[in-house]
Structures are given as C-alpha cells and as structure tokens.
Image (cartoon, rainbow, N blue to C red):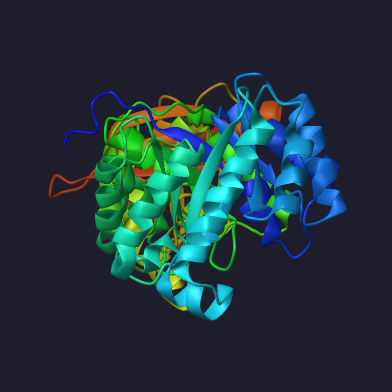
C-alpha cells in the first residue's frame, strides 16, 4: 500500500511531558511557558503539555499553556487509564481550542503479567472504559488518543493488541499511538508491527509513532514508521525524555526533508530552539550531536576538508547532510588543523583571519603546523597565526639584514646596505631608481643578484589596526632554475617593508 503520497507528517511534541518528567528538576509553569512559546515558533502541530495528574505544579502548567495556546495547535495532556487522571487532564486543558486527552495502558505480555499484574482482558476493558470516559469529557470539541504502552514488546500478542485497538476506536479513540517504550530491538522489528497495525485499522485512524532512544535508533524508527503509515510523529526537543531520551525532533524533520517529504515546521528555528532548550533543561548539547552539536560542522581530516571547502557554498556539501542555514545555524563549517589535516584547512584558517597567503606559501607552512599539531593536538587559531607571521614575515636563513640608509644628502637614490651572509658581513653602497632597486643593486654588487618579476605594496592588518596598519610588500623572484618565489615584508615604513621582503626572499631561496 502506498501511504506516502502527499501525506504531511504531524509533529506532536512531547518535550513538556516525556521530556519534562525525565528532568532532574522538572520545569515550573513559567519555564514550561518559555519552551511552549518556542514550540509555537517552531510550528509544531500538537503539544503534549504535561501529565496533569502527576503534581499540582504540572496541573497548573497545563492549565496555563492551554489558556495561551494558539487555536490551530492541538493541546494534549497525558492520563493513565484511570478516572482521576482523566478528570485532571480534561480540567487542565479545557480552555484550549483543540483539546486532546491522551490515555494509555501497557499491553505487552511481560508488562501485563509482571507490572500491571492483570489479565489481558481486564487490561482491554480498562482501556476501553478510560477512552469512553475521556471521550465523554471531551465532547464534540476534543479528541482522545490511546497509547499501547510497550507496543514494541507486543510481537507475540499482536492479534490481541489489534483486537483491543478496534474496541478502543469504537470507544472513541481517533489517534492510536504505538510506543517503543523501551528500544530493545532493531528498528525493522517495530516498523513491521506498526505496518501491521496500520493495515488492520480503518484508514481514518491516525497512527502515531513514539520511540525511545535506548539503543540510539529512535530517529530511524520514527522516520521509517512514517513511511509505513504513521502520520503523527511524537518527538521531543533535543531528544529529551526518559533514560536515553525520546526521538529527536530535528533529526526526524531533517531526515524527512532530505527524503523529499514536505515538513510542516519552521526549520530555520531549529538551532535557536535547541540552544534555548539545552539551557532551560540544564542538559548540554553533546558536541557531536547530529545537526546541533558544536562539532557537527567541523572537519579535521585533509580529505574531508578539501571536499568541504570545494562545496562550501553549494546547497549540497560533500561532507554535510544539509547547509547549516537550513536549521538557522549561522556558523559555517569549521576547519580544525590537526596532524591529520592538510593545506586546504590551513589556507582557509589563515584566510578567515583576513591574512593574505598563496597556496604555495601555505604548502610551505604545512609541515611546520603538522609538527606542532602532532605534539599538541588541534592547533588554536592563534598558534596558526603565530606560525604564519613567523614563517611568512620573519623567514629564518643565512642572510641577516643589518641596515639600509641613505648614503648622501642629495636627492639621488644612493643607499648603503649592511647585511651578513652565513656570519660574514657585507657593506655595499649602490645607486638606483628608488630604494627598492638600489637595495637589489647593492646585493648584486655583493654577488647576490636576484631577478625581480613582481612587486606590489598593500596595507597589512587593516582589519585589526585600522589607520595604524603596516605596509606590506609582496615580491616575486625568479630563481636560476626558473622557479618563482613569493616573499613578503611588513613594517610601518614602506621602505623597510621592501627591504624585509627582499631578505625574506633571499632566505627562502638560499635555504632551499
Ligand atoms: O513511552 C511511552 O510508552 C509513553 C507513553 C505514556 C505514551 O511515554
Ligand atoms: Zn515515552
């Protein structure tokens, strides 16, 4: 059967109930209201606002949220299949435009026998009576949802469950929730059961998926449940919920979106919601959490960095499931330089700090950065900046610059250059067209002729120093074997920047 044609998923949030009941300090009314407003911005279709029978505080919270809920959102409250819980929910959510009582009882053989200690037929009767009662309180305005708690453990009594569900529907339930209350098996086991129930029940009944994440596969189970007919997807923000949590709403939404399903949520709201929820719940987001984790956009291996950079402005990236902006993340993909990284990351990091560098220059820095990364692990950006300044602007080698001064007080460009090469001092006076040419002429006189093929000067550090920016000279020399070497010098004085660039170039050439 094709259940997928144009069927919009219905996002039913359980953060304020299943998520909240698992918090070390459950939220009070004001805190719940903050999360609720975030859920409204996210655009969920239904919110289970709480378990009003569990405490006076939760009853009050459910009442408040029901009273401020927009008309288009279903407001549900959870009740055990007992009269007093059902009354509490009905009372708490009565001001909502779309109220729903969600009642449940376990139907797995194990739970009925050892926890409820009840005969299956009694369990069925309890469920049916609870639904009838809830329906009588909801009247025409509201709905009743029924959950088969521990449905994931019902493979051996599925026929009993299906027969019971027919009676539950007869009693007034319109949404049937099939929770994997404890995730014990592979997703396919549960999906097969969901599909069987879907096929056995009338088409107008909404099938709902509610999966706990004990083995880390709740997202997969929920997504695949959708494709076998579950329309209502019960998820929580940041995956909050009992034990290892519930199904993470963001992962389900994005997986469906990537599968071409129209997802009725404001996806760009996800990241903001995740950060706020983590703060409110006092449950930090794991740095490796899919989509929202701090490190979820980081690339550290050279191959991944290369692919990521080549596709970073494209909608589809080589090494990411989505463009981060889809979920409202404005931080871009990050490149961390480790001993496993390569030139692409180094180039990107240096460029991202506003520094000029060529690919050839980057290649020269890679072994130096790798050596440090091997010792210390991922290099902080400041360490990379230090390497860059040292290796590009203070190149070590056999040449040591001493001084470059005008040799007379005429207008002619006659300069005296002092420097040493391998410890031997040189002192040459030369003339030329401007200080740069004069410096090169003085070097030629000392026996170190260089062929200049490119020269330019620009400001360096404008972004950080503003008007105080250094002058930067970029020079290219062509060596005897035809290789072009790029070298740079920076100094507040343009003339000194030129001379420094020349000596950095000499040290590069003569070190090679
Ligand atoms: O996990 C579960 O079975 C539940 C039910 C109460 C729906 O949370
Ligand atoms: Zn649950």
- Horizontally, residue 254 falls left or right of residue 123, namely left
Image coords of residue 367 (percent x, y): 34, 65
- Residue 502 in sight: no
The residue under the point 57% across, 57% down is: 126
| Horizontal arrangement in the rendering, residue 486 relative to residue 458 (left or right) | left
Give x and y (percent) for residue 502: 41, 44
Q: In the rendered view, would you say 266 is above or below 252? A: above
Which residue does the image show at 44% across and 62% down from the upper left? 396
Q: Which x, y percent locates residue 383?
A: 55, 60
Q: Residue furthest left?
A: 481
Seen from the viewer's position, the closer of residues 75 and 36 is 75
In percent of the image, x 34 and y 37: which residue is there? 256
* Lateral position of residue 448 relative to residue 238, left or right: left
**Quick one: 155 or 353, which is closer to the camera?**
155
- x and y percentages locating residue 411 in the rendered image: 56, 21
| Whether residue 272 is situated above or below residue 214 in the rendered picture | above
Which residue is at 62% across, 55% downward? Answer: 81
Q: In which quarter of the image is the N terminus?
A: top left
């Amino acid at each position: 059967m094709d259940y997928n044609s144009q069927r919009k998923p219905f996002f039913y949030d359980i953060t304020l109930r299943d998520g909240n009941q698992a918090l070390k300090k459950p939220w009070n009314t004001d805190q719940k209201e903050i999360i609720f407003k975030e859920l409204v911005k996210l655009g969920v279709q239904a919110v289970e606002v709480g378990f009003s029978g569990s405490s006076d505080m939760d009853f009050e919270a459910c009442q408040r949220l029901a009273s401020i809920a927009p008309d288009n959102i279903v407001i549900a409250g959870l009740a055990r299949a007992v009269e007093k819980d059902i009354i509490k929910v009905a009372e708490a959510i009565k001001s909502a435009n779309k109220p729903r009582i969600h009642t449940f009882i376990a139907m797995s053989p194990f739970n009925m026998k050892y926890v409820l200690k009840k005969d299956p037929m009694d369990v069925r009767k309890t469920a049916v009576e609870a639904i009838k009662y809830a329906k009588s309180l909801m009247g025409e305005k509201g709905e009743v949802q029924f959950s088969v708690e521990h449905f994931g453990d019902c493979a051996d009594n599925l026929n009993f469950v299906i027969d019971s569900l027919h009676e539950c529907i007869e009693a007034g339930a319109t949404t049937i929730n099939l929770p994997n209350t404890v995730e014990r098996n592979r997703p396919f086991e549960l999906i097969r059961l969901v599909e069987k129930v879907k096929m056995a029940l009338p088409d107008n009944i909404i099938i709902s998926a509610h999966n706990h994440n004990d083995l880390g596969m709740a997202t997969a189970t929920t997504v695949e449940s959708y494709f076998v007919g579950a329309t209502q997807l019960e998820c929580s923000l940041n995956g909050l919920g009992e034990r290892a949590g519930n199904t993470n709403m963001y992962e389900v939404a994005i997986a469906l979106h990537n599968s071409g399903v129209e997802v009725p949520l404001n996806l760009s709201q996800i990241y903001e919601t995740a950060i706020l929820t983590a703060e409110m719940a006092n449950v930090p987001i794991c740095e490796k959490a899919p989509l929202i984790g701090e490190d979820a956009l980081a690339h550290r291996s050279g191959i991944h960095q290369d692919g990521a950079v080549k596709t970073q402005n494209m909608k589809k990236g080589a090494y990411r499931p989505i463009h981060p902006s889809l979920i409202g993340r404005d931080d871009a993909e990050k490149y961390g330089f480790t001993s496993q990284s390569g030139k692409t990351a180094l180039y990107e990091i240096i460029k991202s700090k506003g520094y000029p560098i060529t690919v050839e220059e980057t290649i020269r820095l890679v072994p130096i950065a790798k050596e440090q990364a091997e010792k210390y692990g991922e290099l902080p950006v400041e360490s990379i900046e230090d390497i860059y300044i040292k290796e590009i602007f203070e190149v070590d080698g056999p040449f040591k610059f001493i001084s470059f001064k005008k040799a007379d007080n005429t207008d002619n460009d006659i300069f005296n250059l002092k420097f040493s090469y391998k410890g031997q001092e040189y002192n040459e006076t030369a003339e030329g067209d401007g200080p740069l040419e004069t410096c090169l002429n003085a070097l030629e006189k000392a026996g170190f002729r260089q062929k200049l093929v490119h020269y330019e000067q620009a400001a360096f550090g404008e972004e950080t120093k503003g008007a105080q920016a250094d002058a930067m000279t970029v020079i290219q020399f062509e060596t005897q074997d035809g290789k072009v070497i790029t070298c740079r010098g920076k100094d507040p004085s343009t003339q000194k920047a030129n001379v420094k660039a020349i000596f950095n170039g000499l040290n590069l050439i003569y070190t090679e």
